[in-house]
Structures are given as C-alpha cells and as structure tokens.
Image (cartoon, grey):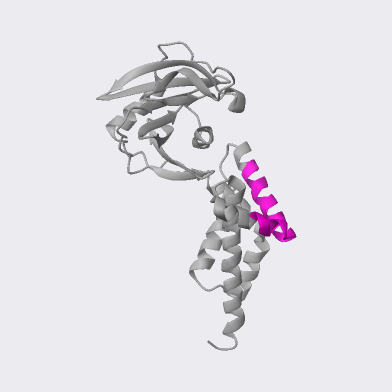
Amino acid sequence: MTSADIPEAAEAAEGAREGGELAELAALADGSLPPQRREELEARVAASPRLQALLAEQRAALRAVLGRDERAPARLHEAVAARAGAERRPARPARRRRLAALGAGLAAAAVAVLLLVALPGSEEPAPPGLAEAAAFAARPPTSGAPVSRGGERVLAGVAVEGVRYPDWAREYGWRARGSRVDRLGSHRAVTVFYEKRARRVGYTIVSRPPLALPRSSRAVSLKGHIRRLFSARGHAVVTWQRRGHTCVLSGAGIRARTLVRLTV
C-alpha cells in the first residue's frame, strides 16, 4: 500500500463503521436489536449527540413509513442502490463527495422504508393448500363476531388448538365482524373477519403441520418479525407461523404493508 492509498483505506474503513452504526440504529429504532446489544448501544447514544440525532432520524423515518401506505420515493431507492454499488467497488473522490451529500438522514430513511416496500413476487401459483387458505378471506362468515373480554388483546371463544386471534379494534381500528370454519384436507382452518371503513380482511389459522410456502414468496421484516408475502388471485397475502400453525392474512384491495403491520 502506497502513502496515497492510506487516506482512501482509512476513508473506506470509516464508511464501513458508519454503515454498521446505521444498521444498529435502525434495529434499535424498530425494536429488533438483541437485548445484549441494546444496552450497549443505548449507552453510546446517551453519550453522543451525533448518535442521538441519527437515532431520531431513524425513528422519524420509521414513523413516516408506518403512517403512509404508498411506495417509497424513487430517490430513496436510488440512494440505496448508490450505497450498495459503492460498497462493491472502490469509490472515486468525486463519487464519495456526491454520496456524502445525500446525508445520513436520507440513508436512514431509505433503510427503514425498504423494510416495508417489498411486494409479492410473480404470479406463480401458490401451493394448493396455501392458495385455498388465502381464498377463505373472500368467503362470507358463518358465525357471529367474537369479542374481547376484560380488556384482553385477544378475542374470546375462537382459537385453533390454543392459538388465539388478536383484537385489533383498539390499536388499529379493525373490528371483528364474524368467523367461519373450513376443512383443508386433514387440516382445520378457522377464519376471523375484520372490517374497517368498508374494507375487510380475513385472518385464517390452519392447524398443524405447517403448509408449504410458494417459491415466489418474499420475506419482509418489521420489528424483528419475519413475514412472507405472495400474490393469490391478484391479492396480496401475508403468511407466517405460530407454534407450528400456518397463519394467513389477506383482503381484496388491501396493501401488503397494511397486512404486515397488522401481524406485528
């Protein structure tokens, strides 16, 4: 390494360190940072005005994402693409200056937004079991609406092998309006319907063992929770597992990001 290379090497190391800081601050902002790292990072943030400002930007970006239901601005995607390209090859001085001009705040917002802009992949058919489970959301309820009792955050009187349904009325404004029970081969499938402003989603829990995922599904992370997204009959579908049971959430005209937020 020549003496001319030393400043660039030091600059690259500094960039990698800042990238790691931003990733940890993003995890701290959305609650997904492991407890053992959280205490250490919180102590560093308390002692650093710079880290406090970056954390505030991360939290503001996350609030903006959760409060909006639209695709991320193109400039955020361009910023992330530029940063990814810069990590794959040595950056020229002029390029480094342009990237630096984007600012840490823009990069932080891009990281937070891209957690939720992942959309279902191609229209590859889902496995029969999972596609049929998603279709239950479009059927009518056959039983009355379950209710919560005693301020609990779950609904009473409806469950699948001990796995219960959330009460989304207070936190999200989605109220349970009915339920139905179906058979899916050897599986029992229970769907609870929720409504908000004339929109409806169906939350189906399928008894064990878990159903196979479509190969076209994509993973999305929010608050440390991983969900899989795919398309079925032109609608976005979110699926995940709880205690070995397959959970499926879908609704006509409901955006994938809305569905993901409900599940965490």
Q: Left or right? Give the position of 196 relative to 48.
A: left
- Kindly report the secondary structure that dominates the magenta region of the rendered protein: helix
Q: Left or right? Give the position of 26 relative to 48.
A: left
Image quarter of residue 190: top left
Residue at (29, 33) in percent of width and height? 209
**Figure check: 92 above or below 244:** below
Relative image position of residue 92 (x, y in whole percent): 58, 75
Q: Is residue 214 magenta?
A: no
Q: Is residue 62 magenta?
A: yes
Relative image position of residue 192 (x, y in whole percent): 44, 20
Q: Left or right? Give the position of 171 relative to 141.
A: right
Residue at (68, 57) in percent of width and height? 45
Residue at (65, 69) in percent of width and height? 97
**Figure check: 216 above or below 13:** above
Is any atom of residue 20 visible in this view? Answer: yes
* Range drawn in magenta: 42-64
Relative image position of residue 85 (x, y in whole percent): 51, 64
Is any atom of residue 75 visible in this view? Answer: no
Residue projecting furthest to the right = 49
Residue at (28, 31) in percent of width and height? 128
The number of numbered discs placed on residues in the rendered structure image is 0
Q: Nearer the viewer, residue 244 or 115?
A: 244
Residue projecting furthest to the left = 186
Relative image position of residue 119 (x, y in whole percent): 46, 42
Image quarter of residue 121: top left
**Figure check: 40 above or below 153:** below
Q: Nearer the viewer, residue 150 or 176?
A: 150
